[in-house]
Amino acid sequence: MRLTSKYETIRRMLSDFKQPEYRYAQIMDAIFKQNVGEYERMTILPKFLRDELTRMLGPNVCSIVPVKEFTSKQVSKVLFAIAGDERVEAVRLTYEQGWKSYCISTQCGCGFGCRFCATGTIGLKRNLTADEITDQLLHFRLNGHALDSVSFMGMGEALANPHIFDAITILTDPHLFGLGHRRITISTIGLLPGIDKLTREFPQVNLTFSLHSPFDDQRSELMPINDRFPVRDVLKALDHHIRHTGRKVYIAYILLRGVNDSTAHAEAVAELLRGRGPGEHLYHVNLIPFNSTEVTPDSYQQSDPDRIKAFVRILKSKGISVTVRTQFGSDINAACGQLYRSE
């Protein structure tokens, strides 16, 4: 069942109270231009309306509550309390040129059990609502931080949560967050129905596919979802996405020492991505150094720097576009694969 967002609730309430149309704009301006986080402080509104907003939605505009913040160089990670006494995390990255990017969660936990990911050890508690997803960004916005780009790469598999599409609609609404579609990135382990829907409904949103092994047997061991959606089936969907959108697709690949960082792996990745037709040049491999945690297996370790360089050389020699992701926040468990409802 589709849940109504706070913004739809406000529209309906204003209609029920026969308020003039400009009231909605006043409320949105208070939130998104004046950074007003409590309905009672929206003094441009009549008191009865402020009281009614508070009664229906609670005193705070944000539906989630910051519990704790962890900071490191260029990184801030916030632990939020959500309904049901659960916790989720979101990360703000500040680059040297001042660009601020956010990594936000779409689920509390994750049910797909990728072996190298801390979030997967929690299991799936529940999907976040569209408000709970977008309120992670609203928290930063209300605290005066610019929102330059956002990645759905936090806790959970974004395309397993049907509310993700409502969240994208909210984020791209020019009267709300006003983010451009190309400022948003969805990361997926390869859920074909979600990829197809994203291609149809939000073709300009960036798409990242988590590969992590080019070999089906090994990928199924690392990522059990591969038994349901094998690599080659996912790549066919990505080929269609490229043909339909003309947009680049990113291939995320976490390098695990002695597991998936061999010459054979690099050559097989290149083989998967070559010969895919006119759009093959739009595949870009993003290599990610592994980040260990207390809950991920000790057998998984970060690849040696020389091994990473060799992997890059092989891909480039095969004509594959490749970069190594710049890592931030591993010292506060804020990097890729480390989000875990920190207490």
Image: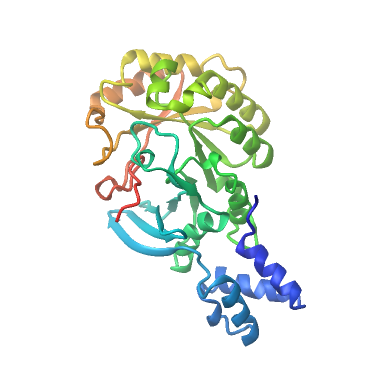
Q: Residue 212 occupies which quadrant of the picture?
A: top left
Q: Residue 47 occupies which quadrant of the picture?
A: bottom right
Residue beneath the point at 58% across and 60% down: 177
Name the residue furthest front. 84
Image quadrant occupied by the C terminus = bottom left
Q: Position of residue 121 (x, y in %)?
A: 35, 39
Q: Position of residue 159 (x, y in %)?
A: 55, 39
Q: Which one is in front, 96 or 324?
A: 324
Residue 60 vs 118, above or below: the answer is: below
Q: Which one is in front, 39 or 125?
A: 125
Residue beneath the point at 31% across and 17% down: 262
Marker count (numbered): 0
Q: Which one is in front, 252 or 307?
A: 252
Q: Position of residue 34 (x, y in %)?
A: 54, 74
Q: Is residue 21 visible?
A: no
Residue 102 vs 303, above or below: the answer is: below
In the displayed structure image, the side of residue 15 where residue 343 appears, left or right: left
Residue beneath the point at 36% across and 57% down: 79
